Image: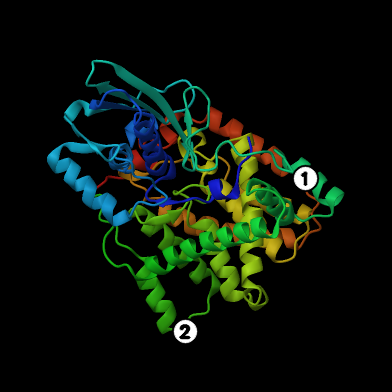
Amino acid sequence: MTISVFELFSVGIGPSSSHTVGPMRAGADFADELRSAPSTVRAVHVDLYGSLAATGRGHGTFAAVLLGLEGNRPETVDPDYVEKRGAEIEATRRIAFGGRDEVSLCAEEIVLHPLTVLPRHTNGIRFRAELADGMEHEAVYYSVGGGFVERESGADTVNPLAGTPGVPHDFDTAAALLETCPRTGRTVPQLMLENEIALHGGPSDVAEREVRAGLLHIWEVMEACIERGFRAEGMLPGGLGVKRRAPGLYRRLVDSDGADAMDWLNVAAMAVNEENACGGRIVTAPTNGAAGIVPSVLYYALKFRSSLAARREQVVCDYLLTAAAIAVLYKRRASISGAEVGCQGEVGSACSMAAGALAQVMGATPAQVENAAEIGIEHNLGLTCDPIGGLVQIPCIERNAIASVKAVNAARIALHGDGTHRVSLDQAIETMRQTGADMLSKYKETSLGGLAVNVPEC
């Protein structure tokens, strides 16, 4: 399966890529499928399984599913509309299925099965539509992390770029990537750029301009999210009483003309994840729960490295392409789903992506890029996903800030070496996969273990 940078970095809404973005895509796909049905939809039943059921309301899954069934998509839906429409549905108990057919809801329309895991993934959704002619239509979806959604049949038909053609530099291991770079004379971002050009219609100046414009747009959304988070005051939703801290820290840094790079790195990461916690406009990187790490490290690099800021557009493109190349390895060889392997698959992979990408734009060789990415994941192995109250707030927001600092340090360590090291990135990714398989399910985005049960919610 070819994975595009624009699938790994997709624009959506908070607070969770697997629990909000994915379910909304699944709902919209199911509604689209029934547009050509010979009869109107009379009722829709939704069953949520595993992690989706365990943290559904806190992760925004209920509203995401229902708005998806109304035809909304995370790439385009207005975050403010989600909150408003979600409240309307709650009050009226009616949805406009596919944007047109009025369907009544009752308390049993969304049934939770937190202790039942469907065969392919813990994030399972079953839709069943009753048609006016007495027939029924059923489909099962899996939200497998990062907003990626798969059907029970195995056909990955839900994501925006699914079904794309092959690419000139296909790889699924870091070893293959490191072999390809010297053989072709390309850097990691150059390989990824040629792959993306192929996905956008083949070699041409137009295709390359489209790819670069798309990458710059991704950064614009990321940067806008940081800036919103710097200024948005108040409390985070959900009842935990968590105050938004990024605006206060941002003001102190501005007022003191603060030049402490680590403080700016921390506040940028926290700003993104506070926006995510409020259901704001987010870029999966590679997930929403870890959305603050990749943009905060790039923000830091452009702010504190004048040589990088001077060639901003090229740096942005190279950084995101390199991060995406590393993300491909996690997606293919392990998982980026906290519900499947714990937070090592989300924050750990994002830390690895940011570390390798920062090393690249600071002049690293492909071997040093791989080294930085390996350091980034090695020191996140075993990280559990245990959000308090099912909300993407504690420990998620601070965890992004800490991992951003780790990513910068990993890049710096790698740049001091020559790229040779004992543990390969492939070995570290395999270790992450095995660790996730061995991890008890209560530590994998269920809010049934860890901080989620040892810290009172109020």
Residue 423 in view: no
SS state under label 1: loop
Q: Image point 16% across, 29% down: which residue?
A: 106
State the image quarter where residue 331 is shown: top right
Image: 293 above or below 326: below
Image: 282 above or below 224: above
Residue 452 in view: yes
Image: 352 above or below 39: below
Q: Is residue 266 left or right of residue 20?
A: right
Reading the image, the residue beneath label 2 is 257
**Image coords of residue 241 (percent x, y):** 25, 55
Q: Is residue 32 left or right of residue 263?
A: left
Q: Is residue 21 left or right of residue 199?
A: left
Residue that sits furthest to the left in the current view:
92
Between 11 and 49, the residue placed more toward the observer is 11
The crowd level at tag 2 (other Cα within 10 Å; few <14, some 14-19, many 20+) is few
Q: Image point 36% across, 28% down: which residue?
A: 36
Reading the image, the residue beneath label 1 is 422
Which of the image's four quarters has the N terminus? top right
In the image, what residue type sits under mark 1?
A: Arg
SS state under label 2: loop
